[in-house]
Image (tube, rainbow, N blue to C red):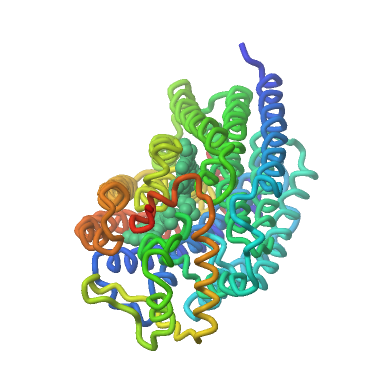
Amino acid sequence: MKYKSQKVAYWFFALSMLLLTLQLVYGFIMGFAHAGMDGLHEWIPFNTAKAVHINLLVVWLLSGFMGAAYYIIPEESQIELVSVKLAYVQLITLALVGVAAIVGYHFNYWEGRKFLEIPRPLDYLVVANVLLFMGLILVTLYKGKRKTTTALVLAMGLLFAALLYLPGMLDFNSQVLDSFFRWWVVHLWVEGVWELIMGGILSFLLIKLTGVDREVIEKWLYVIIGLTFLSGILGTGHHYYYIGVNKIWLIVGGIFSALEPLAFLAMTLFALNMYRKGEKKHPNKIALYWTLGSAIVAFIGAGLLGFAHTLPQTNLYTHGTIVTASHAHLSFWGAYAMIVFAIISYSLPNMTGRKYYDSARGRMAFWLANIGMLGMTVSFGVAGVAQVYMERIYKMDFMKVQMEIEVHFIVLIIMATLFATGITLYIIEFIKHGQPTDEALEIDNQ
Amino acid sequence: MLSKKQARAFFLGGTLVTFLIFIGLTVYSLSAAQDQSNIENLSESAIRGKYLWETNNCMGCHTIMGEGGYYAPELTKVVDRQGEAYIRGVLMSPTPWQRADHGNRKMVAYEMTEDQANDMIEFFKWIGEIDLNGFETVVSPLAEK
Ligand code: HEM
Ligand code: HEM
Ligand SMILES: [Fe+2]
């Protein structure tokens, strides 16, 4: 660690871990419900569990991205964060708004629009919170001694993500328009600007971990995010095939979304090549695992599984089935959860001053979480394909089909248990590092 | 070899061009002539229905036009499939709706008034008439004809 103010990142990461734990609890509730055990229905009906599960996901990832920015931006800009106090204010208000929303979901207080369930009054608080965050990051960047491409790409991703929250707050009487603009948030986040955030963090980590020249890494970063927007913006059309807008999107969405995997493939090749080229052998092996793992799993989850259902001919049958849930899990996990784990694993020893870089438990956490998540992806995938055949091709009744595929959710629960064990080990490691301290300033190793 | 400057130009150029095309296509496909949703038939009652749909987060369990949760039946063509009386029964039920032949999944007991249930039905009817580029025939077996 080079600047005292980087320590604030630790608390964003801690909040991330806490919310992740809660997210998994609600995942299990839904897994059991799908397997035919909906015993909690009276207190936590499925729609509550689902809204909590996906909102906690988004909030813990955002908290992780914010932590990453508070760590990376001062180091890249070579100055202290402009105000540490305000960063703590931002942290606490973020936690409060998040908790208020989650509690509300248990009392039928929400706006039933998938991923954007936060009710309107709380939306304004989210906006205020994010404005404060962006202010701190941008002013630090502006005052900094240098403006690196890595820092600019990360900040640009965060800024666009904030701006794209706004179309989700528009009000429509037509469900078609509602859905149309909901995708400006959901799709343009995960298949657009969040990839800039991921790219920025990845590039920072590769510079630190492999020692490859910054100019080379940042050049490829531009190519990757170029591919991202080139395919991802018009790729939004893959959500417009069957929601009541015209057929132009079948062509445009089909072609451009089929190109989206290229950006993820480029990300994988980039990470692996830089690793191979690197002279430096950084002792933080766990951070390297998560960094390379993220680049690889993102390609499988988003690139390959995304491509599997993105052509209009396939999507006609898979649209809105459990096939989508299979892709959703591995893509979010690989691209965003794992990159947050990577920056946490890299920065923790630097913030706490303990050179605790590698351990059997840390490796176990990596493998269990990944094997568990792959197993979950396959369980959802098999259930989804079976559903498509029975319901969409053989025209069986929806509920009858659901009863047929219950068994796959038993497998899901077993795999999710492996996954959750991996996460538990990771959190134990997190706690074992101890808390951040100013003494860590001296022992930064580069 | 590609220089960093060229790489940046590729990023900025590609982004600008695709962004402009995207905005253009959005304007075009939302223009009145391209409407496939029969927007002129969207009644006050159906709009109240949409409000109920949102404030109760029905989408947390059900899909509509293929979007939502994967726990409960797709509702795009529900009026054709089940008829109005059945839907009213589900929405107004004072106990969680559950069918013996459908395992033990339950729906939340919303105890809607008859007016509210009718608003929901108007909403479903409007949705059911939308031209979904072919999805309407796949998603809802009983509505094939
Ligand atoms: C990290 C990147 C990605 C993430 C996190 C992600 C996540 C998701 C999620 C959560 C959904 C469900 C959304 C909803 O129904 O509200 C979804 C749907 C979809 N994704 Fe992705 N995705 C990613 C990348 C991709 C890519 C690269 C492709 C195409 C090559 C793709 C193709 C699709 C398609 C076609 C759907 C619609 C499925 C349906 O019709 O039900 N995704 N994605
Ligand atoms: C203990 C682990 C987990 C279990 C048992 C679990 C289970 C589930 C279930 C049953 C659903 C509901 C599907 C439906 O609507 O019927 C779901 C949705 C979802 N989960 Fe998980 N989950 C777990 C962990 C995760 C993790 C770690 C992530 C992200 C990295 C994640 C991301 C999502 C997303 C994005 C959706 C929405 C998918 C969609 O609607 O298309 N889940 N999960
Ligand atoms: Fe998408």
Determine if residue A370 is in view.
yes
Residue shown at 60% from the left, 26% from the top: A223
Q: Nearer the viewer, residue A360 or A46?
A: A46
Residue A119 is left or right of residue A82, and the answer is left
Residue shown at 50% from the left, 85% from the top: B114
Is A296 above or below relative to A323? above
Quarter of the view holding residue A20: bottom left
Q: Residue furthest top?
A: B1
Give the tally of numbered discs: 0
Is A290 above or below relative to A354? above
Q: Nearer the viewer, residue A103 or B142?
A: B142
Check the picture and name the quadrant holding the C terminus of chain A. top right
Q: Position of residue A33 (x, y in %)?
A: 29, 68
Q: Position of residue A304 (x, y in %)?
A: 39, 35
Residue shown at 59% from the left, 22% from the top: A216
Residue shown at 63% from the left, 24% from the top: A215
Q: Residue furthest right?
A: A143
Is A294 above or below relative to A397? above
Quarter of the view holding residue A407: bottom left
Q: Nearer the viewer, residue A3 or A67?
A: A67
Determine if residue A335 is in view.
no
Q: Position of residue A93 (x, y in %)?
A: 64, 69
Q: Position of residue B58 (x, y in %)?
A: 47, 70
